[in-house]
Image (cartoon, rainbow, N blue to C red):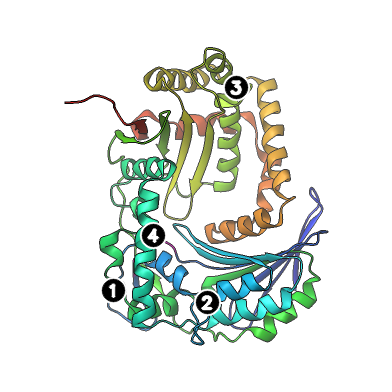
Amino acid sequence: MQIVENSKIKEKLFIEKLSNGINVMILPKKTRKKYIVWSANFGSIDNKFYAPGEDVLTTVPDGIAHYLEHKMFEQENRKNSLDVLTSLGVEANAYTTNDHTAFLFECTENFDEALDEFMNYMQNPYFTDDNVEKERGIIEQEIMMYDDYPEWSIYMNAMRCMYKANEMNIDVAGSKESISKIDKEQLYKVYDAFYRPDNMIIVLCGNFEPKEALEKIKQKMTLEPYEEETRRVYNKEPDEINQKYIEKEMNISMPSVIIGYKDNDLKSDKVKKDIAIDILGTLLFGKSSDFFKNLYECGKIFSEPIINYEFSKTYAHVLIQLQTNYVEDVLNIANSQIENLKQNGINDEDFQIAKKKVYGNIVKDYNDVSTIATGIVSDYFKGINSFDYFEEFNSLNKEYVEKILKETFVEDRKVISVIKPISDKKD
């Protein structure tokens, strides 16, 4: 078993690749909690592929990864594994993202019994015409719910502004029309193509003895290795954005805004850039920034803007999200804040303060077993090691952050997504 140790946070990650190709990672923590997540590198962007042994392109309906997530709990004995896990007193769940699907549970007791059920349903899917059809109405309701959810609407509108062809503009749940085309044969095909050992990872975090936990996984593992690979196909995305601005009215009390910057550089050191953008977010829009203090004092914003750098192997972008009743004014001030920092550079003292704050936030994430485990999964499918974030701080300097500011926050690649309250105007 390989051991990767990070002396800065005094954590050890135990890693073993099983004979069938699946990676198991275990990070012990001094806590009563046990947390496990099993994830496949299959998400909403994976809608075209060549299945193992096939030379004909398969195209599946949008939302099929999310549909499969729902159906994985169904068992031949007519029991729902989610209900079984809940009856054992464990907190079980699942989620689908753009590039992976994850199944998980957390507990302080009955881990072995829950693991039996967990390992069984993950390795033995059961789809029928009836149970697939039964789920369709449930997912339609979920799609309608997300359509009415302002935070999701503003995010998806930002993606549609930013990307013309990239699959990031596809809603994770799909649409009512797309999911109407999903059947059991398609679900089995994508399971066989993507829920294969070499395309999955199991991460455990919490009250575990690594060798003992690994042995339990090995004893219950029945998946066989694959000899041929699944080849994914993605649309070619142009460098330019799709559209500059989008606006939507919804039943909200205060407008929400996303400022997005499309990043076409997919080959640079993403970990280092992610840290740099976190530092820039603190400098530009954090509670100590002129932007926040001035706008807060005059009542134009009431909470700190949220800035994220989202990236994977096929996309990258910066998102800045805030709420304000003064949309145009705040957008102009935000733009001035960015341009002023580009022209004047970063103050040395401000840089050190922001750097320490970002480092502290990363350290803080290692206090929670679920945050650790899901972070390891997300990073793994991006091709990075979560511990790399701590190592990169040594090489991060002010000049690099200024370079990222100028290269990434580019006006020609900026999009604006706005959700406004429903207008009271009448015809």
In the image, 63 versus 13, the foreground residue is 63
The numbered dot on residue 45 is 4
Residue type indicated by callout 4: Ile
Quadrant for the N terminus in the image? bottom right
The residue mark sitting in front, 4 or 1, is 4
Name the residue carrying label 1: 57
**132 versus 171 height, above or below:** below
Locate residue 186: give its quadrant: bottom left
Location of mark 3 (residue) = 346
Mark 4 residue crowding within 10 angstroms, few (<14) / some (14–19) / many (20+) = many
CA gap, disc 4 to disc 1?
A: 15 Å
Circle 4: element type: loop
**6 to the left or right of 153:** right
Q: Amino acid at mark 2?
A: Asn
Q: Nearer the viewer, mark 4 or mark 3?
A: 4
In the depicted structure, whether residue 260 falls above or below residue 52: above
Position of residue 90 relative to residue 172, above or below, is: below
Query: Which comes before the other along the chain, label 3 or label 2?
Result: 2
Asked if the residue under mark 1 is in contact with the one under mark 4, i.e. CB atoms within 8 Å, the reply is no
